Image (tube, rainbow, N blue to C red):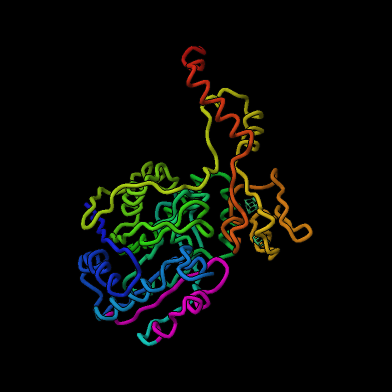
Amino acid sequence: MVKIHYSRAENYSPAVLDEALKKSVGPVLAGIGGVAGKKVMIKPNLLEYRKENDPASVHPQLLTALCRMLKDGGAAEIAVIENPAVRTADMIIKAMNIMPELECMGVKVANCAKYTKFPMPEASRYHQLELAGEFREYDLVINFAKAKTHAMMTFTGGVKNLFGLVRGSERLSWHLAVGRNFDDFADMLLDIYLLVAPQVTLLDGITGMEGNGPGSGDAVELGFLCAASDALALDASVSERLGIAGTPVLKQAARRMLIPEYCNCGEVPAARTIKLPEPPEKKLEWGVYFPVKLRKLLRGMLLSKPVVNRKMCISCGLCAQKCPPQTLKMHHGIPKFDYPGCIRCYCCQEFCPKGAITVVPSRTLTLLSMLERIIRKLNIYRPGKRR
Ligand code: SF4
Ligand code: SF4
């Protein structure tokens, strides 16, 4: 039975963090014999850091407090290794203003570099994947995630955090390869998780992100930290706490019977809900009775689509550069979407530094959803009567 260790933490002051880390990650580290004499790699979520307390990344003070805890525990070596979406790990840590403190503790900060092709343990979708191989050089890997919503995967917690080990350019090709099949993408994330098998997953849920995540959502005060030896169990537990149901990762993990039994312990936060991103695709049951061609046409019309807020756009062109199928082009300084060619991976939304791109449901989808509700209410549609 995997224990999910929760601790309450209302803010990022050093005293609060030290206490919260002791209660959350402390028991998990104790369960694997502590850190004394071990080489420890921390893989934090450092997506971006554009302003103080930016919820796109784990909090700088929490990262520092974790390193301090490991150092005090006698770790032989501590390395913070990440491959942020746009900048380097070094640049993000400098933007966070914690480099001097980390250097003082002898913590190494590095971008992922040692890319190697690894055979996948279950090879559920892909036989091999190229990943940053540094995790193989350390005795202990701490997967340090942030509680955030995600336009494509609904929630980004422990399992999704390890996608950062895929080379930046390759990440776009994977989005392209799986296209709109989010279950395939989730299976790939699970394969990566099974390969890396971090012994510890820690989640920064003190301030999380809701809405237009993972880069441009709104900060939401959640007030907890949690840690476990199993990232899937942790993601399942946190999803329950935050009212997030049916994420592709947890759905596929359940199908593959990968979620272990777990229980919550410590200062478990009360269940609540956070604002989720618009679902990328809603399924209408009666669609299954349509011919395939019509279904395909409808699918294109029904998918939620990325749109740009022209007033917020600074014409940096990053969204167009990062578009996997390269169907998004800059036109007079503003991104122009080619919706028939758009695979709805939402990379443009994820990479936009200004939060100028949001994912909105199509008008057709909104209309059909209304129609569906009416049909259900009036009890007109009875699939059983068709035969
Ligand atoms: S326009 Fe955006 S959502 Fe569409 S394929 Fe390009 S990056 Fe993905
Ligand atoms: S990434 Fe954002 S700010 Fe930059 S061009 Fe695209 S929409 Fe505009």
Using residue 24 as the reference point, say whether residue 245 is left or right of it.
Answer: right
**Foreground residue among 201 and 205:** 205
Q: Position of residue 296 (x, y in %)?
A: 64, 33
Residue 303 found in image quarter: top right
Q: What residue range appears in magenta?
A: 75-103
Please give left or right for residue 207 compared with residue 278 in the image. Answer: left
Q: Quadrant of ligand 2?
A: bottom right
Q: Is residue 129 left or right of residue 315?
A: left
Q: Is residue 189 above or below residue 83?
A: above
**Residue 96 is inside the magenta segment:** yes
Question: Is any part of residue 160 visible from this angle?
Answer: no
Q: Residue at x 59, y 61 (%)?
A: 351
Residue sitting at x 52%, y 53%: 212
Q: Nearer the viewer, residue 316 or 3?
A: 316
Which residue is at a point 28% across and 76% down the rendered structure image? 69
Q: Residue furthest bottom?
A: 104
173 or 5: which is nearer to us?
A: 5
Q: Is residue 337 visible?
A: yes
Relative image position of residue 320 (x, y in whole percent): 68, 59
Quick one: which residue is furthest to the right in this view?
Answer: 332
* Position of 77 relative to 280 (above/below): below
Q: Position of residue 243 (x, y in %)?
A: 37, 45
Report the residue at 41% width, 44% height from top. Answer: 252
Q: How many marks?
A: 0
Q: Nearer the viewer, residue 42 or 222?
A: 222
Q: Is residue 138 found inside the magenta-colored segment of the image?
A: no
Quarter of the image where one finds residue 191: bottom left
Residue 230 percent location from the top left of the image: 31, 57
